Image (tube, rainbow, N blue to C red):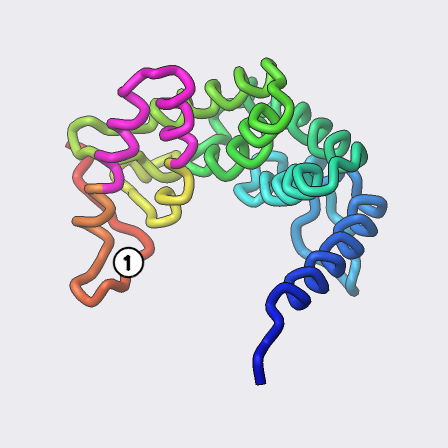
Amino acid sequence: MEVNYRDWIEETYQKLCMKFSAECDRIGDRIPYSPKNGKYVEDCSQTALDCWTNGFWPGILWQMYHVTKEEKYKEAASKIEQKFDALFDEYVKLHHDVGFMWLHTAVASYRLTGEERSKVRGLHAANLLAGRYNPLGGFIRAWNEDRIGWIIIDCMMNIPLLYWAGRETKDPRFTAIAMKHADTAMNMLVREDGSCNHIAVLDPL
C-alpha cells in the first residue's frame, strides 16, 4: 500500500499548530522545564534563568511564527529573549550552552525580523562562547568552577552560534574556534566504532 506522505505531513502540521497555539496561550513568555501532573507549573525565568534548556521553548515559538506569522508567537519569544539580558550581567552562571540559549532566541529573532538588538545579543553570546576557547588545547571549555579542562560532546550543538557570528561579522576567528573545537572533539570524544564519550577531561596546559 502506497503511503501518501503529503497528507501525513499536512495532518501532522495541523496537530502541531493546534498543540503549540494552545501551549502558547497557556504558557506565553514563561519558560517551561518539566511538567507536573500534565501541566507546566515551574517558570524557569523565575527559578533558573541560566538553565541550558531555556532556549528551546522560545525557539519553538520562533519556528511557529516563521510558518504561521501569528503575532502571539513573536510576542512571547521576544519577551523571553529580553529576560535573558539579565544573564549577561550575571555572567559567571553562563557556560558552554550559550549557543542553545541565544541561537534559538536572539539569532532566530534577527533572522526573521531583522531586529538589530537581537543581532547584538547573538553576537554578545557568541563572544562569550568564543571566550571559553582554550588555545593551548584547542577546545571550548565546558562548565565552570574547577572543570578547567573539561569538554562535552553537547558543545557540538552550541558551536553553530560561532559559525553564524563568523558569517555575520566576516571575522574568521569565530569559525576557526568552532572548527578547532570540532577537531578536538572528534579526536578526543569519538570512538573508533562511531559512538562517542559524553565528557573528556583534558590537560588545560
The image quadrant of residue 145 is top left
Q: Is residue 202 visible?
A: yes
Kind of residue at badge 1: Asn
Q: Is 111 displayed left or right of 57 in the figure?
A: left
The image quadrant of residue 166 is top left
The image shows residue 149 at horizontal and vertical percentages of: 25, 38
Q: Is 140 displayed left or right of 138 in the figure?
A: right
The image shows residue 81 at horizontal and vertical percentages of: 65, 28
Q: Which residues are magenta?
A: 160-182
Residue at which label 1 appears: 197
Crowd tier of the residue under label 1, counting other residues whose Cα lies within 10 Å: few below 14, some 14–19, many 20 or above: few
Above-or-below relation of 12 to 189: below
Q: Residue at x 38, y 29 (%)?
A: 162
Number of callouts in the render?
Answer: 1
Above-or-below relation of 128 to 11: above
Numbered disc 1: secondary structure = loop
The image quadrant of residue 158 is top left
Q: Residue at x 77, y 56 (%)?
A: 19
Q: Is 120 displayed left or right of 61 in the figure?
A: left
Q: Quadrant of the C terminus?
A: top left
The image shows residue 124 at horizontal and vertical percentages of: 48, 19
Q: Quadrant of the N terminus?
A: bottom right
Who is closer to the viewer here, 20 or 199?
20
Q: Is 145 displayed left or right of 20 in the figure?
A: left
Residue placed furthest toward the bottom: 1
